[in-house]
Amino acid sequence: MGVPYIYSITKPMKYTIETTINKPKKEVVALYDNIPNLYKWMEGLQSVELLSGEEGKKGAKTQMVFQTGKRNMTMTETILVNELPDKMVTTYDADGVHNIIFTEFIEEGTQTIYRTYQEFKFKGALRLIGFLFPKAFKKQSKKYLEDFKRFAESN
């Protein structure tokens, strides 16, 4: 029975989160697709630096540094697909964690549904963290969506 247990630790963690924003899609996406705005809603973001490619375009790599508690966390964002205003697919890589996010914006009258499909893959010691604390990752993802919603609706 050891093999199924090991497999369950290494399986990707997947979930979907969404929120409804009380603004038209065009306005929501304009706020979302604006790097200086990240600092206004993404808690702990310290810096964003383009590493390669053209900002916002497929293939662009960006380094993002976050202050989390007393430590800094550095991750690299890679844009796989940018078909905004409808969808965007990005990956985020940090020590021991690979996250792919499919983001979509769906217009419903004067509101916009902001939905993300997320998949996390863990390496090393973080496999156990991902296995033991999956709700923490989902909670943080939900927080980012809700923080963006508050930002978008106040602008």
Image (cartoon, rainbow, N blue to C red):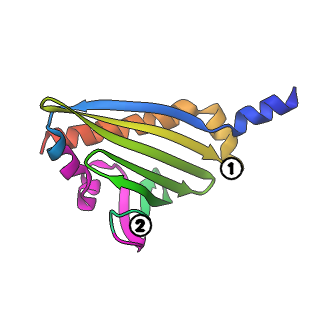
Q: Which residue is mark 2?
A: 60
Residue 63's image quarter?
bottom left
Q: Quadrant of the N terminus?
A: top right
* Residue 144 at x, y percent in the picture: 35, 41
Q: Is residue 43 magenta?
A: yes
Seen in the picture, residue 66 relative to 10 is either above or below; the reply is below
Q: Amino acid at mark 2?
A: Ala
* Residue 118 at x, y percent in the picture: 48, 39
Q: Which residue is mark 1?
A: 123
Q: Nearer the viewer, mark 2 or mark 1?
A: 2
Residue at horizontal 34 percent and vertical 40 percent from the top:
104
Residue range of the region highlighted in magenta in the rendering = 28-54
Q: Is residue 92 magenta?
A: no
What is the secondary structure assignment of the residue under circle 1? loop
Residue 134's image quarter?
top right
Q: Quadrant of the C terminus?
A: top left
Q: Are marks 2 and 1 in contact (CB under 8 Å)?
A: no
Q: Residue furthest right?
A: 1
Residue at horizontal 34 percent and vertical 49 percent from the top:
43
Residue at horizontal 50 percent and vertical 47 percent from the top:
100
Query: Left or right: 115 with respect to 3?
Result: left
